[in-house]
Image (cartoon, helix red, strand yellow):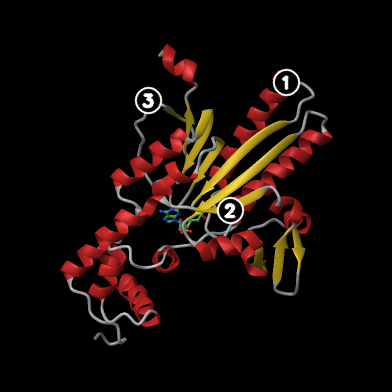
Amino acid sequence: MSAFNMPEMHSDEFVLWQALLEKQTGLWLPESRKTFLVAALSRHMKEKSVKDYSELYSRLNAGSVSVLDWASLVDSLTVHETCFYREKASLQIVLSYCRNTLMDRFKQFPGQPQHIQLWSVGCSTGEEAYSLAIELDKLNVGFKEANTGSAYFGVAGVDISYPSLAVAREGIYLGRQLNFVPQVTKNTYFNRLSDEYYQIKDHIRQRTCFIQGNILDLQAKVKQEYDVIYCQNVLIYFKHERKLEVIAQLTKRLKPGGLLVLGHGEITSVNSDELTRVNNKHCLAYLRKDEEKRMAE
Ligand SMILES: C[S@@+](CC[C@H](N)C(=O)[O-])C[C@H]1O[C@@H](n2cnc3c(N)ncnc32)[C@H](O)[C@@H]1O
């Protein structure tokens, strides 16, 4: 036992756990995160009255634990840190893209409302999806006021973590979590519930939906195609080959001409003949090539 009453884990055991987690979630725990793994597993073993790591490992590996138990373990091993308006340059590129795309569609189909669908991948407790939805609503209000057109937009959030998604669906946050939200936005888009808590207004919550899913298993869960796929601060925990696999899957779910925004610095470059890099040094974004253009190349 260690000083904090956590059973010690040998290096060969750690390697097995590393591989199991990587296989199930894509999450790659470096040696430096061993204490974090040990703490999470010890908590779980105590709750489930499991006597040691190897018993827990065998149960998980054999699939003889409930989906919810597995999910709660994964939840304690993943990082859920997020906040409103977190990646400003990436948000900016999404807004420019949506503005230009909608303007083109309004011109092409005058008088017809247009649809635009966004996807926040690894959405955690929802702040990212709501930041996108709020900014799209502002864009839409501007279009309506200028009589340019009107858009139906939707933002879907996907995450592996059930507890994070429960928070996202409620859309209730502590006042201090709104520190990066401009005051006017706070007044327009949040209801004050008490001295401490604020809730996203219904008309924005109705434009969002939150779905549980593993991004390594997108084929099974996500059938729809999106105009924008926004994946920030998720790939950082994956090994290089996994990152490329996930990016290939995400690309398949982009509409032709759609925008894929990845975390700046999470991957150096993506070599795909389906994607063109957007020229912007502050963020990492790609456009899915139009099928016709791709065939003509
Ligand atoms: C650090 S948070 C990033 C949240 C948000 N994208 C942001 O940038 O603020 C990473 C999120 O990715 C989720 N995640 C990690 N592995 C995942 C997987 N295999 N499938 C789906 N979500 C995953 C975690 O549960 C966590 O909520």
Q: Which residue position is annotated with label 1? A: 109
- Determine the residue located farthest toward the front in the rendered image: 64
Q: What quarter of the picture does the C terminus occupy?
A: top left
Total number of numbered discs in the rendering: 3
Q: Secondary structure at mark 2?
A: strand
Q: CA distance from mark 1 to mark 2?
A: 31 Å
Residue at the spot x=72%, y=39% of the render?
139
For the point 49% across and 30% down, which residue is it? 287
Residue 118 occupies which quadrant of the picture? top right
Q: Earlier in the sequence, mark 1 or mark 3?
A: 1
Against 183, residue 149 (above or below) is: above
Which residue has dot 3 on it?
Answer: 273
Describe the element under mark 1 as helix, strand or loop. loop
Amino acid of disc 2: Phe
Q: Distance of mark 2 from mark 3, alpha carbons?
A: 31 Å
In the picture, measured across the screen, residue 101 lies left or right of residue 281, that is right
Q: Quadrant of residue 103?
A: top right
Q: Position of residue 293 (x, y in %)?
A: 47, 16
| Left or right relative to 53: residue 146 | right
| Picture layout, residue 250 above or below residue 183 | above
Q: Residues within 10 Å of mark 2 (few under 14, many from 20)?
A: many
Amino acid type of the residue tagged 3 in the rendering: Asp
Assess whether mark 2 and mark 1 are in contact (beta carbons under 8 angstroms): no
Q: Give the residue displayed 17% in from the left and 69% down from the top.
A: 11
Residue linked to disc 2: 210
* Amino acid type, mark 1: Phe
Q: Is residue 291 above or below residue 186?
A: above
